[in-house]
Image (cartoon, helix red, strand yellow):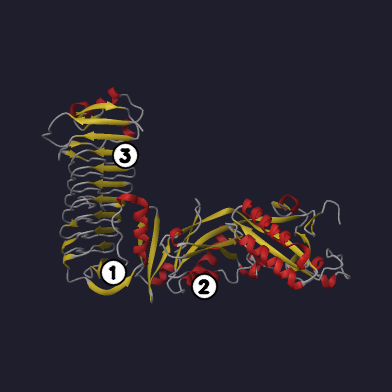
Amino acid sequence: MSGGAMQVNGVRIDDTFAEAFGMSALGLVVTADTPRWAMICARTMTGFGTSVIGCGAECGIDREMSPAETPDGRPGVRVLMFGFSPDALVPQLRNRVGQCVLTSPGSACFNGLESATKLGLASGPRFFGDGWQTAKKLGKRRFWRVPVMDGEFVIEDKCGVTTEAVGGGNLLVLGRDRAGLLETTEAAVAAIAKINDVITPFPGGIVRSGSKVGSKYKGAIASTNDAFCPVLKGAVKSDCDPDTIAVLEIVIDGLTSKSVADAMRAGLKAITDMGAAKGVSRVSAGNYGGKLGQHHYHLKDLVA
Amino acid sequence: MSTLTLTLRGALHHPVDLTSVTPNAFAGRSLYEIEQLSLGALRVCDVFAVSGTPGETVAISGSSSYLDYAGAGLDAGTLVFEGSVGNYAATAMKGGRLDIRGDAGAYLASRQSGGLVTVKGAAGDFAGGTRPGDRFGMVGGIVLVDGNVGERAGERMRRGTIITRGSFGAAAGSRMVGGTLWTEKGFGAGPGPMLRRGTLIGPAVERLLPTFSDCGVHDLNILKILNKYIAETLGALAPRPVPVLVRRYAGDLATLGKGEILLPA
């Protein structure tokens, strides 16, 4: 065991930290006639939103919302979108809402983040109305009504955007048993899902292809994190243990630094609660030596 | 909460402009200074006896249809008229709350952009309507009238909501550009002449104009949003929710035609 590492329920917690970056983010509330269709809509519009590098935005579902919480009193889902800057989020917002929310049966789309800075949520989609769109301003909120084949698509005029968001909080979970490791990591993702204002944008919240910065190939800005590839542990300077056969990563984006820390704490607790019995041996975190990211989350501070 | 009370000294025989009677206009002034404030050619003390403490609420005791511009320019705080007021109440009101516990005259809420107006009695013609020389009538906020509203309510109204527990008179929503008129009892004859945009909601209409076209029965999500917004904003004062299944009449097709009259399905 390295100096400073701790052991909780048979799982080693490395004395290291996750390094995360400042990002911009917005929140949307999508509603529909049923919870099922609200979720279909949310899943569709957050699809292909795992990494800002290749997808343009990191997107995910924050939580389901009850009818009492939504502007139209219907079931809803709050989704979050993260990008490098508010400007970078504009085309993502227009395309994802225009192609995935506008098109979803019975859907409506509302602002889901109060902020002084706003982006035009309806700037593109409202023109689908071809001149028949109308707006209704109620209090300080303006709603556009766009005639569509199943009635009207209602979309709020603007949505809030924050530049205080954090992207790249992470946990690396190492294990001796792939099935048990996946089960434990899934439990961690489920625990993180209960924390508000965060998403885990990768498939099922889990990444199996963690990356390092740079590549031997020109044009590739990232490549496989060889130090955590168990099949290379005899060939490279490895961070894996002798008995490690798989490593899974959970990447967390949050609207605030606190929400990311809370999510990492919840994930870590879920992992240590399950303990080593399922084959998890160790939890680590990804960083770049602390020189690139503004936010550092030390695992030892997050162990309950 | 401190209240300043203005008590009408006697019956009025000519209009009095109350534009300067707002909680903010009185804030930080002594009672003497308030008494000396101008009401057009008069002073406050010529019309009212002043008592109490300046604060967030100003109460006006007495009733006269000569009390014009009640709550005009109100931007914060509460202004309560115990009786009826004259014309132009809530003109250019920006925020706060104006309670009129009697009737209101013509042009109630013209150019109102925010805040809440309640009227216990009836409201006159051109409620939320534009006045000669103005581009638009009401442009925001909420008006809630317990009684009936006169003719041509919402004339050139652009935004905001006027709700009556009674009915609207003839030609409600004439030349309306946007906003919402909502009645619990119904519309008089010919609502929406030259209606460009905006929504007229009610249980019945005396006679529809021929330039409104039946678009069928629809379950409109915007009505769920409207119901929820009004319930959250008005609380116990909120009217009964609009049924979301309505028959939609589009019009006025003699002009832009993007307005609508929504009647029970």
The image quarter in which residue B51 lies: top left
Amino acid type at image mark 3: Thr
Cα–Cα span, label 1 and label 2: 28 Å
Look at 28% across and 69% down and name the residue there: B246
Circle 1 sits on which residue?
A: B246
Spatial CA distance of label 1 from label 3 is 36 Å
Residue B206 horizontal side relative to residue A293, left or right: left
Q: Which badge, 1 or 3, is on the more N-terminal residue?
A: 3
Query: What's the amino acid at mark 1?
Result: Val
Residue found at x 29% / y 67%: B258
Q: Nearer the viewer, residue A109 or A4?
A: A4
* Residue situated in front as seen by the camera: A167 or A243: A243
Q: Amino acid at mark 2?
A: Ile
Which quadrant does the N terminus of chain A fall into?
A: bottom right
Per the image, the residue denoted by label 2 is A40
In terms of secondary structure, where does tag 3 sit?
Answer: strand
Q: Is residue B24 left or right of residue A51?
A: left
Residue A87: x and y, percent? 55, 60
Label 1: how many Cα within 10 Å (few below 14, some 14–19, many 20+): many
Q: Which disc, if any, is residue B78?
A: 3
Q: Residue at left 28%, top 63%?
A: B197
Answer whether labels 1 and 2 touch (C-beta < 8 Å). no
Secondary structure under tag 1 reads: strand
